[in-house]
Each structure stands twice: as structure tokens, then as C-alpha cells.
Image (cartoon, rainbow, N blue to C red):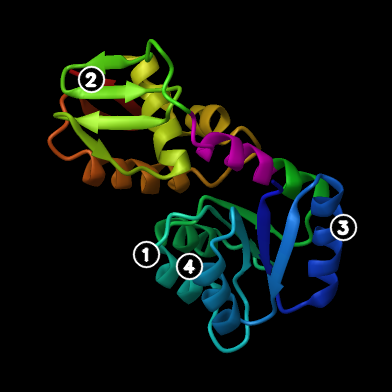
Amino acid sequence: MAETIMIVDDEQHIIDLASMYFEGEGFKIDSATDGKTALGKILADKPALVVLDLMLPGMDGWEVCRRVRATSDVPIIMLTARGEDIDRIVGLELGADDYLTKPFNPRELVARVKAILRRTEKRSLPAEDTVLKINNLWIYPDRRIVTVEGKTVDLRVKEFDLILTLAEHQGMVFTREKLLDVVWGYDFAGETRTVDVHIAHLRHKLKGMSPTIETVWGVGYRLDK
């Protein structure tokens, strides 16, 4: 069954262009041109992923994202004509999974959507479940599950990828630039605060975890006992 991508943009030609590429890859498309309509459709129809423009009439994309995140974990890619770092950071702090600036390459948008959907895909439990154990932190890479003291912790896509990367290289110091390269997988140069935002989220969500995420001042981060 084809997965549905919700495209939210007040420019119909953007919706039409993106739809053409997504439909060519076998996705179904739903769309909205204003924030209020988009919010209602997202919560009611539960699409597989939302491509969300920030500058919308009535209710902007930031507010749509905030309200969606109050009740739903649907992946969100922010889409905007504005390229300032602060816009990107605000979107990520509100719970967006990724961010793409207009004008964009439709093929890149489709590639990012596919990557996020692969990571969030629900997998059946294998006969022998792989687990990475570090004290009270247990990570199940195949199922993308993290537990602390036996309790499952709800992490976003990039948060999981970030803690897994640190755990797989315990004790190794990663620069922010290296984490951007490894975890995000594309050119995010000059926006290393993105890493700081996600580290702050992880520290909050993984409170009580042993090992700890240690800041190496002037360099970056490492997972340490």
C-alpha cells in the first residue's frame, strides 16, 4: 500500500512540482495551502510524512509543527524560502526532523523523505534481537529502540541516529562538524548549533542514563562512562 505524503505550501506550483516527483516514486499525495487546513488533515488522516512550509497564511508552519508535536510523532520536513540559521534551529527545536530551503531540488526532497521513512519504518522483532548495552543504556539498532533502566525512551529520527553514533564509538570525541556529516549525511556546514540542539534534547530525554554525554570544550561531544 502506497504511503501518503502531506505537502503543505501556499504556492500551488510547489505542491504540483513536488507531487509529480513523489507520485513518480509511488507515493500518494495529500496537500493543503494554509496552516489550519493542514493541521486538521495531519491529525485526522495521519500521513506517513509531512513536508511543511513555514510561511503559511493564518497559522504559520512553526505553530502547525508545535501543535502536531503535542499529539503526533509523524516525521516533518520543514520547507521555507528563508535561509537564516535561526529559522532552522527554531524548526528543529519544535520537533522537525529535517529542513530544506527553497529553491530546492525535488530529487533531493524525495531522497530525504525516503531516508526518514526507512529509519522510522516499523520492523518486526527478529528471532535474536541485536542490542548494544552500555550500563543502563540499551540500544536496539534494528528496531530503533532505546531504553534506560528498562524503560523505552521516545526519540526522534536524528536523536536516535545521534545517540547510536556516539554509543557505537564510546569514548571517541566527535566534532560537531563530524556529527553533522555522519548523522545528517549531507552538507550542513556552518550550522553546528543543530548538533547542540539535539544533544540538549537527548540529555533531557535520557535523564538518568549511565553513560553520560560529555561535552569536550572547544571540540565536540563523546559518550563516556
Please report whichever mark, 3 or 2, sits nearer to the chain's N-terminal start.
Answer: 3
Residue 25 location, x and y as percent? 82, 44
Question: Is the residue under label 3 in contact with that under label 4 (CB below 8 Å)?
Answer: no
Tell me the SS state at disc 3.
helix
Q: Position of residue 224 (x, y in %)?
A: 23, 20
Identified at 37% across, 64% down, the residue is: 71
Tell me if mark 2 has few (under 14), some (14-19) or many (20+) residues whose alpha carbon lies within 10 angstroms of its own.
some
Secondary element under disc 4, as helix, strand or loop, is: helix
211 above or below 184?
above
Instruction: Give the residue type at disc 3.
Output: Met
**Element assignment for label 2:** strand
Q: In this view, does 50 lie above or below 133?
A: below
Residue highlighted by disc 2: 224
Label for residue 65? 4
Q: Which residue lies furthest to the bottom in this view?
A: 58
- Looking at the rendering, the stretch of residues picked out in magenta corresponds to 112-123
